[in-house]
Amino acid sequence: MISVEFASSYANPAGSPIRELFPYLNRPGMISFAGGYPSPSLFDAEGLQQAAQHAFADTAGSLQYGATEGSPALRQALAQLCAARGIQCDPSHLIVTTGSQQAFDLLVRVYIAPAASVYVETPAYPAAIQALRLAQARIHEVLVDEDGIDVDALQRQLEDAVPSDRPKLLYTVPTFSNPCGTLLTQSRREALVRLALKYEFLIIEDDPYGELAFSTSVPPPIYATGHVMAAADNPVVYLSSLSKTVAPALRVGWMLAPAEILRRCAIAKQTSDLCTSPLAQAVASRYLASSRYAAMVAGARDEYASRMRAMAHALRDELADTLTFFEPKGGMFVWAELARPMDMPRLFQAAVEQGVLYVPGDAFYPYEPRGQGMRLSFATPSTHEIAQGVRRLARALRLCADHRSSASR
Amino acid sequence: MISVEFASSYANPAGSPIRELFPYLNRPGMISFAGGYPSPSLFDAEGLQQAAQHAFADTAGSLQYGATEGSPALRQALAQLCAARGIQCDPSHLIVTTGSQQAFDLLVRVYIAPAASVYVETPAYPAAIQALRLAQARIHEVLVDEDGIDVDALQRQLEDAVPSDRPKLLYTVPTFSNPCGTLLTQSRREALVRLALKYEFLIIEDDPYGELAFSTSVPPPIYATGHVMAAADNPVVYLSSLSKTVAPALRVGWMLAPAEILRRCAIAKQTSDLCTSPLAQAVASRYLASSRYAAMVAGARDEYASRMRAMAHALRDELADTLTFFEPKGGMFVWAELARPMDMPRLFQAAVEQGVLYVPGDAFYPYEPRGQGMRLSFATPSTHEIAQGVRRLARALRLCADHRSSASR
């Protein structure tokens, strides 16, 4: 190949640790707790097909290029979705993005020069870490517990930081986080906004899972709290997506932010993909305008709740002494930590051999992993498969523990 | 708004000069030569709707997340499309992108650190200039004539450049360029590859219009020439798109490049949008698998040829003394230059007042415009509207000339 030097971030880049698991997925009989994929059994294919038919009936609007900011109909529908979540906004306050992944990427482009400082809740969504790493941000970890970001620890971090280490952005999934399933309490949401106002950083609230609450009422998005507390100085940028509620294949997400940020993100989006697929947008807006969305999400909520309970039940039955975890109140993930040290790569291999897949915890840390975690997604397998998968995981853990004790003799 | 500093490229960014024309487009009766949009009358809405129905019949594959590199079926179909253009390739040699705009953006991420040197044919596609500007590249202009890039002038530029000014990339639309409609000759394609091999830069061949040839046989893509001349050292990266031949709304493009480049671009794409809409990909691959594509492109070719002839005819009739231009052999654009100096902003306003829109030439230059050009797209208006629009343009030119001569009295 002709020798042209890559930019330094790309000289020797690591791919996504989750993508590296893909080859294992196709092994016959494999039960996967690995993917962050919504369950295909919940897709409302019929409703989406109807939406597509309606979209084609009005081809003028859906086959041509569209506005970079998104189609007026979809922006209207997404503003209504925001309203149902407790955010009052005008369609002009949001732009449509190619998944919420693109929304985060646009913010990184617009804010992050090499060596810029960012805070990231940890463990965190790997693609967010990767985007920041490739932008050569200095990533600072902010630890979470069952109630989300530990705001007292965060406050100490901010107080102790030299000015150049103060963050431009803090990235968080406050409502049923990936990978931990944590839910940030309302008092912490308020404390977080106070800190953002005091130390002048943006809170990037990524909210793909917020509608997937199992039973508890969920606090409104941090964005809503930020609006109440600071009005025009709201330090929160809100990202969301239809991928976990309607279908990932649409690649439709959105971003709610002040005009000055949206304008720059739209300029970045022009060079990125000109506009999000107008066909996908037309399908999405027509689907949201139909009466099927609410029923579909309610169905997903119930199904995920029952799968989560199946997983929690099986983990308690099989692995109560070996793993610690808490039951998430929504979302798609259980985060389990090993109570005792273990050879994690060996455990992963043993699990694969037993026919069960999960995502090893180190994928969720920007630097060295803390503890010995694993992300177990209950979204895709059936309750029966979940029970079976946990039994396989238990066997893998026993085999590794046996090996360890025999090796230490 | 909370005060967080933007990255320097985004502190005060200029938007797309073409987008700034959008408000004028909606004026009643406006005839637009401005957009680079394909004619909606040519969209095969029925065929695409059938393709969508087939895609939904197999929902498992089209509603879930997909591989970052693109769906196997679409990669296969695009490799066949490449074969028809004279490029023999395997589906694994290309990745699907969210329009060819994203393909270029991924290359910029992967190669361009601030102050990296790039060569761009000038006048050039504005979104390419914008992507390079936002990446803080040092942009060097390479001039074109009717036969595309002037390779002799390029050779002198390369010989004279200090090593740090030698380019990593050269960006060109060799086949029916935007904005000039130039067609790079085969001997220049070969000379360009020789220069790329000697001075070690990549040729980014952007080819959205190649299939829209009016009559002449078109030389094969530079990529094919590069393959013949250099085999594994082929210095050409090939980008293309379905936007100008099938429909922009799919946002489906692709990139053909060596594995080491594709791997890095796929990593960049993970952080950009995870994958191109699998729904749009499913529609695209099923459409390409149908027998309708060839007929559709043949129809577009004929229609654009007749619109181009209508424009050329009208320009000669009305403006032979005022404008110089050549008839493009394909594509969507005529580039016209004023024979005598004129107040270009004033002319644009006069044209708007007369009810005709074009893109002022300065949009296509990274720095100062050379000459007094305008891009006239014949793709969207009917032949009747084209004749009428040129008459309006002639009136605007006369008004400005009269004003000038009366002002100079």
Image: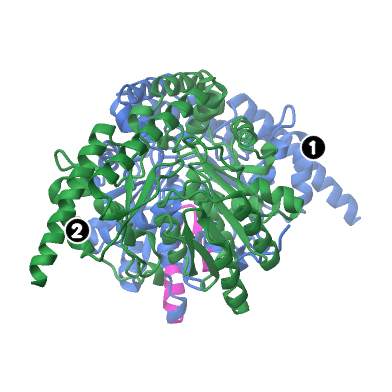
Chain colours: A blue, B green
Q: In the image, residue A381 lies at what x, y percent?
A: 60, 29
Q: Amino acid at mark 1?
A: Glu
Side (left or right) of A65 relative to B183: left
Q: In the image, residue B97 lies at what x, y percent?
A: 53, 44
Mark 2 touching mark 1, by CB under 8 A? no
Return the residue nearer the eye: A100 or A198.
A100
Q: Amino acid at mark 2?
A: Leu
- Specify the quadrant that holds the N terminus of chain A: bottom right
Residue neighbourhood size for the residue with mark 2, other residues' Cα within 10 Å, grouped as few (<14), some (14–19), many (≥20) = some
Q: Is residue B30 magenta?
A: no
Q: CA distance from mark 2 to mark 1?
A: 73 Å
Q: Report in which chain the residue with disc 2 lies.
A: B
Indicate which label's residue lies in the foreground, 2 or 1: 2
Q: Is residue A161 magenta?
A: yes
In the picture as drawn, the residue positioned furthest to the right comes out as: A409
Return the residue nearer the eye: A17 or A176.
A17
- Vertical comparison of A279 with A109: above or below: above
Q: Which residues are magenta?
A: A135-162
Q: In the image, residue B15 lies at what x, y percent?
A: 32, 59
Which residue lies at the image location 67% right of the left edge and 65% below the top edge? Answer: B200
Rendered image quadrant of residue B156: bottom right
- Specify the quadrant that holds the C terminus of chain A: bottom right
Is residue B7 visible from the viewing direction of this image? no
- Vertical comparison of B73 with B194: above or below: above
For label 1, the SS is: helix
Residue under numbered circle 1: A353
Rendered image quadrant of residue B268: bottom right
Residue under numbered circle 2: B347
Residue B8: which disc?
none
Q: In the image, residue B235 lies at what x, y percent?
A: 67, 56
